[in-house]
Image (cartoon, rainbow, N blue to C red):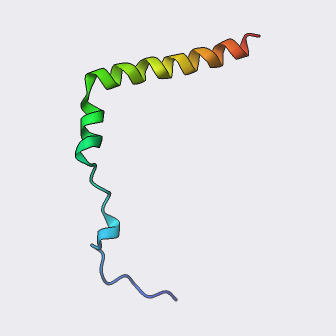
Amino acid sequence: MPAKNKEPYQQAYYPPVPTGFTRYMRQSIPWQFIRFWIINFKIFKLLMKSHN
């Protein structure tokens, strides 16, 4: 029988905190616009392959 966890609030239980750069990229309107078009282009390529 495994031993019970006696320390339920260890650091491993908390999610990592995003860095300042990560938060900036998530909130940057120009970067989101660029990613939007990149993702749309990938979907467009996939659709064109399926229509051949």
Whether 25 is drawn above or below 7: the answer is above
- The answer to which of 34 and 43 lies nearer the viewer is 34
- Residue at (41% x, 20% y) in the render: 36
* Residue at the far right in the pictured view: 52
Whether 16 is drawn above or below 4: the answer is above
x%, y% of residue 46? 64, 19
- Pick the quarter of the image with the C terminus: top right
x%, y% of residue 6? 32, 84
Whether 16 is drawn above or below 29: the answer is below
x%, y% of residue 26? 29, 34
Query: Does residue 49 appear left or right of residue 3 in this picture?
Result: right
x%, y% of residue 17? 27, 53
Rendered image quadrant of residue 51: top right
- Residue at (49% x, 86% y) in the render: 2
* Residue at the far front in the pictured view: 21
Query: Does residue 28 appear left or right of residue 33 in this picture?
Result: left
- Residue at (41% x, 24% y) in the render: 35
- The answer to which of 34 and 17 lies nearer the viewer is 34
- Residue at (49% x, 22% y) in the render: 39
- The answer to which of 14 and 42 lies nearer the viewer is 42
Query: Does residue 6 appear left or right of residue 3 in this picture?
Result: left
